Structures are given as structure tokens and as C-alpha cells.
Image (cartoon, rainbow, N blue to C red):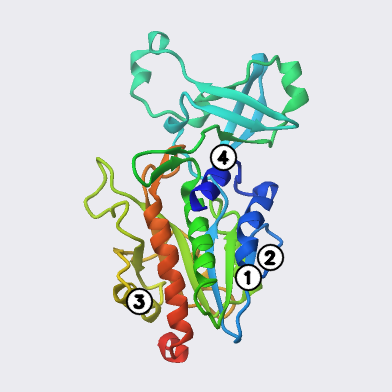
Amino acid sequence: MLKEFLFEVCSNQFVSGFEHVNGDMLKKYFEPYTDSCSKDMIGSYIFKQDGINNTKIMLAAHIDEIGLMVTRILDNGFLSFTSVGGINPSSLVAQDVTVYGRENVFGVIGIKPPHVTPEEERDKALKLKDLYIDTGYSRENLEKLVKVGDIATVKREPVSLQGTVISAKALDDKACVAVMLETAKELRKLSHKSNIYYAATAQEETGCRGSVTASYKVNPDIGIVLDVGFGTAPGMPPEICALGKGPIVSFGGRLNQKLTKKFIEVCKEYNYPMQYEAIPGGTGTDTESVQISREGVPCILLSIPLRYMHTSVETIDMVDIETTGKAIARFINELDNSDLEEILCF
């Protein structure tokens, strides 16, 4: 089910700020395991499993993805564009794209052939202003289909590599939305006293905005923030974590030390593999806004190792999703049977 979920959501667009377009996909998968669904005014989807006490635990993983936005319609069917979120322009060269206009318009992004590229330009880094989407339409016909402000994404179908490894666009952070789905499924098997909220947050890629409103709406006692981290690949630093070896547990001043310690204890007790990273300052995730919501929320940050972040071939190991989801469910079950006041106090 997790792979089916990921292949469907990664095949569709959830560009930051436009997540609402395909939100019913989330409902289809989460509703069998949750008791209610709501949205905030930014566009985050919040699913709830009812508990029997007043404690509220919120999991947060952003559903939005990076994308492109049309800035001008040019002669001969070309479109100039900018990025929505952080994109390396070189990753866009020779890609197919879908422009979501009045109807879907397909195009390609090309560059000048080397034969006509001056030698002094060949080694220069590409910029977005140097790239164009070629649709093949005339300008007159294209203006009937597309307008400035329409969004586009790279047209890339998810693929299975060897074993349990998959590659797709937008696994940042749909992989962690899948972790929440696995947690919800596992908690249907385990007892849980707390009220559990699964927030698929909007607009993380453009400023961690949906997590601000979602955490304000839920007002959780505990936050479990989920995002992707860097996975090992040739040329990456040696401290980068490996695919298939479990979630990355983060340590830092913005993360609750006792909650983090408790999660590690649970993983060790139940033999869930895990990895570690040190984050001395900002995490670059939804943790930033969840942690300081209202009077403050004690948070932990767990990450799924991912290769080729912010490209159309992001790559993960499904084992990490399943392991993390199961570990979080067991963690919640253990928290429900612990002295929370002792764990959460400084």
C-alpha cells in the first residue's frame, strides 16, 4: 500500500501553494485509519485518530513539492519560467514538463547545442533565465491555454530500482507523508490513549508556512516532525547517512532532549535500526515553526535518507519508511504509558 500511495502522489502535482488541487488523494489513503479530517486556511490536511485522554501528539510532514511557474509567454511556443522552491537549473536540462494551464500542456526544456555554444559559456553555471519551456504551439494558441502564474512540474513517472529502492520526483517530502500513513496503520493495531494528528503541511518549500497554521490549529503537546535527509552517494561527505539503515535521529538545541532520548530507547528495545545527525542551529524543516507555536511545543525530528534532493530522481529505500512508521507507532504507545510530565519538563 505504501508504494502504491507514493507512486500515485508522486505522479501528480502538489507544488507549494497549490497543494489543495490533489488533496483528495490523501483522504483516500488516510481515511481508513483515521477518524476525521480537517484543513487549515493555508491548505494543510490534518487527519486525526481519536484518543481517550487530553494529550495531543502531532506528526508533521510537508506534502508540497518544488516546481516551476510561468513568467512570460513568448513567440513560437516558448515559455520563460521561474522556480517555486529551490531548484538547481542544471537539473532541468533535457527534461519533459507538464504545464498546468486551462488544460495540461506538455513541453521540453532544452539548451543550445555545444556546436553553437561559445567556449567561454560552456563551463558557466546555468541560470533559470537561460532556460525555456518549448511547447511547440504558436504564441496565439499557447495564450489560449496558458497564462502567467500557471505552475509546471517535471514530467517523471516513479520507478522501482533494485530491491526496495524507488526513485521519483517529490519524494521530498511525500516519503514522510507515507511514514505518517504507516504510523496510522500501525496504531490501529496498537493501543493509543493520546489523540494523534497527522498534518500533511503546505508551503514548506516556500517558507514553512503550513506548519505554522497547522500547529496553531492543533495546539499539540508533542510534535514529531518528519522530513528527508541527505543519503549516501558518490561525492557526498562521509558523515551522510545510508539508505536502508533506518531513520536519522536529530540532536540539537531546537529538539527536546528527553523526547529524543525516549525515542532512541524505544528503538533499541524493539530493535529498530536508526542513524544520527547533529544540528547545532536551524533544521531547515517544519520543526522551526512547530517548536515555537503558541507557548512552544517539545519536538523531535526524524529524517528519511534520500539521494539527489530537489531533482526529479529523488531516491529512497522503502524499508526506511516502514521502519520509521513502526518505530513512531511504538514510541507513541510507550509515551502513553509513561510519565509525560517527567519526560517533557526541563
Q: What residue would you read off at disc 3?
A: 266
C-alpha separation, residue under disc 4 versus residue under disc 3: 35 Å
Above or below, 27 relative to 21: below
C-alpha separation, residue under disc 1 versus residue under disc 4: 26 Å
| Helix, strand or loop at mark 4 | helix
Above or below, 269 relative to 60: below
C-alpha separation, residue under disc 2 versus residue under disc 1: 6 Å
Q: What residue would you read off at disc 2?
A: 37
Q: Amino acid at mark 4?
A: Ser
Residue at the spot 68% in from the left edge and 65% down from the top edge:
37
Left or right of 156 on screen, residue 75 = right
Q: Nearer the viewer, residue 123 or 181?
A: 181
C-alpha separation, residue under disc 1 versus residue under disc 3: 23 Å
Q: What residue would you read off at disc 1?
A: 48
Residue at the spot 43% in from the left edge and 74% down from the top edge:
330
Lower position in the chain sequence, tag 4 or tag 2? 4
